[in-house]
């Protein structure tokens, strides 16, 4: 019996089984065509497609796709491989606009995508299509646009920076301790997002202290869900889920923990609201998003899934963008000096609309161009289609737009595309004449998506990043301990492999 279980759990067994199942499906559906496929993309062969080259490049998929796209006349490639549906990957802005806006209705996330994240995100706004998405989008859009929520966000942000982040960095600078800046900023972003969306108090920012259970569970669920999407043969994770083994068992436990934690907060909040209603007392105007969703009459599970989606999207995206920018500034200290001067010369009030530093915003755009928080995103075609560049799309195809590759296309950014040059975002690139920022087409660099599904929290994200960066840069110098270039790792949101170990020094002390 033990030998049989070892056979069923061996990775090669899943690959072999997948090949057989895939072949039978292709033959039975009449789709099997025994010839070399002709399209722009990696070397492909009958039945297995580009499985071999895909497997060989599995540890460098981002750069592999970027190289293939750079060699493509249309900046679009087609990837067909064993164990996965036909995939179109594009770095063509016209295609991106067509997918995200012009023919939006033909490119929903689709069941193959929502199935990957379904256990974790359920029916949350980032994992649904159709009427359910439109209903949640309308509700969330209204809440995000209210002045009271934006004020609550800025008040929460200021409190977390002034009472949490800056005192900790002061202590680190005094003691000369090395700290993982990525982990520190992830904890900070998690605190802000939990306070604004859940109304719960912050956990310890100190990376040396244990992570709270909710954070650990979130990390596990995010990581394993991302592994599902990146699996060379998709059926493997489905079999593991069916058997209840390995990573799928860990995912099940983590999701159960996240759901239980959030549902407990929902129940407690509903009891508090009922008490306010029965006593006739007035609610605090600084209401978190959870309270607003409950008061809007949403079902508990929908509320739970919406909140989980927003926490997942808001935590790692901003922390990743800030981490990469701090690293880039340590490599380009002349830009850092200009930033500090801008911050000192343009002190502004803490309000949502007027909080603006142009060079800092240009630096963020440039950092996210090179290291986008979301490296790629996929939709699935409902019917056959034709992209603007002439690429044929079949019903059911996975259509992926690729911000990581788009930021590295010479055709879009020029020969200096791999260099960190914030001045490329100004109408007048001369350092002394920096004035207005360029209005760049959102489909040229869709780091916040674009079209009907454009990120609702985009302005909040920029406000948070600018406030944190300005507050830290004004007071401290951040210097990495290691000289090696960090490794960019794409998951549901991207991050630095191994974190970013830095020393914090008070500005002006050397």
Image (cartoon, rainbow, N blue to C red):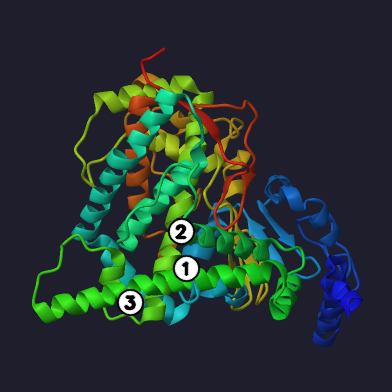
Query: Between disc 3 and disc 2, whose residue precedes?
Result: 3
* Horizontal arrangement in the rendering, residue 380 relative to residue 191 (left or right): right
Read off the residue under disc 2. Answer: 313
Against 431, residue 141 (above or below) is below
Q: Is residue 160 visible?
A: yes
Indicate the quadrant where residue 116 lies: bottom right
Q: Position of residue 221 (x, y in %)?
A: 57, 64
Query: Between disc 1 and disc 2, whose residue precedes?
Result: 1
Q: Which mark is residue 126?
A: 1
* Horizontal arrangement in the rendering, residue 4 relative to residue 477 (left or right): right
Against 50, residue 394 (above or below) is below
| Labels 1, 2: front one | 2
Q: Residue at x 47, y 51 (%)?
A: 317
Q: Residue at x 26, y 70 (%)?
A: 292
Distance from Cα at disc 3 to Cα at disc 2: 23 Å
Kindly state the secondary structure of the residue where label 1 is placed: helix
Sort mark 1 into few (<14), some (14-19) or many (20+) by Cα contacts within 10 Å. Answer: many
Q: Which mark is residue 267?
A: 3
Query: Between disc 1 and disc 3, whose residue precedes?
Result: 1
Against 134, residue 151 (above or below) is above
């Amino acid at each position: 019996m033990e030998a049989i279980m070892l056979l069923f759990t061996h990775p090669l067994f899943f690959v072999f089984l997948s090949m057989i199942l895939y072949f039978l499906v292709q033959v039975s559906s009449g789709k099997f065509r025994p010839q070399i496929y002709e399209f722009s993309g990696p070397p492909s062969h009958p039945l297995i497609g580009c499985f071999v080259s895909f497997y060989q490049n599995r540890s460098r998929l981002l750069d592999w796709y970027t190289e293939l796209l750079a060699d493509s006349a249309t900046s679009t490639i087609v990837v067909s491989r064993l164990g996965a549906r036909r995939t179109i990957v594009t770095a063509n802005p016209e295609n991106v606009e067509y997918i995200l806006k012009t023919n939006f209705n033909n490119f929903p996330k689709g069941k193959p995508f929502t199935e990957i994240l379904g256990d974790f995100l359920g029916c949350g706004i980032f994992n649904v299509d159709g009427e359910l998405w439109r209903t949640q989008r309308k509700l969330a859009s209204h809440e995000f646009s209210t002045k009271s929520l934006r004020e609550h966000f800025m008040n929460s942000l200021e409190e977390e920076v002034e009472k949490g982040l800056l005192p900790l960095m002061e202590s680190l600078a005094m003691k000369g301790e090395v700290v993982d800046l990525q982990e520190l900023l992830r904890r900070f972003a998690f605190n802000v997002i939990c306070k604004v969306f859940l109304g719960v108090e912050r956990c310890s920012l100190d990376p040396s202290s244990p992570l709270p259970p909710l954070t650990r569970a979130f990390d596990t669920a995010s990581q394993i869900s991302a592994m599902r999407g990146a699996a060379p043969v998709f059926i493997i994770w489905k079999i593991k889920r069916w058997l209840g083994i390995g990573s799928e068992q860990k995912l099940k436990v983590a999701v159960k923990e996240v759901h239980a934690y959030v549902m407990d907060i929902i129940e407690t909040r509903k009891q508090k609201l009922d008490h306010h209603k029965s006593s006739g007392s007035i609610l605090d105007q600084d209401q978190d998003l959870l309270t607003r969703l409950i008061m809007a009459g949403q079902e508990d599970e929908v509320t739970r899934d919406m909140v989980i989606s927003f926490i997942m999207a808001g935590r790692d995206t901003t922390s990743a963008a800030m981490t990469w920018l701090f690293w880039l500034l340590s490599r380009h200290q002349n830009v850092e000096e200009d930033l500090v001067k801008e911050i000192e010369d343009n002190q502004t009030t803490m309000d949502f609309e007027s909080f603006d530093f142009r060079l800092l915003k240009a630096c963020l755009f440039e950092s996210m161009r090179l290291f986008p928080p979301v490296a790629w995103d996929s939709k699935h075609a409902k019917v056959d289609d034709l992209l603007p560049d002439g690429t044929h799309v079949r019903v059911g195809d996975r259509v992926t737009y690729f911000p990581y590759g788009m930021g590295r296309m010479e055709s879009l950014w020029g020969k200096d595309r791999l260099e960190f040059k914030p001045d490329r975002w100004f109408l007048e690139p001369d350092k002394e004449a920096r004035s207005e920022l360029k209005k760049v087409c959102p489909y040229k660099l869709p780091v916040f998506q674009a079209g009907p599904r454009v990120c609702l929290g985009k302005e909040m994200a920029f406000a948070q990043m600018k406030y944190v960066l300005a507050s830290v840069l004004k007071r401290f110098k951040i210097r990495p301990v290691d000289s090696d270039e960090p490794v960019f790792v794409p998951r549901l949101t991207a991050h630095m492999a191994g974190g970013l170990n830095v020393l914090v020094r008070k500005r002006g002390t050397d």
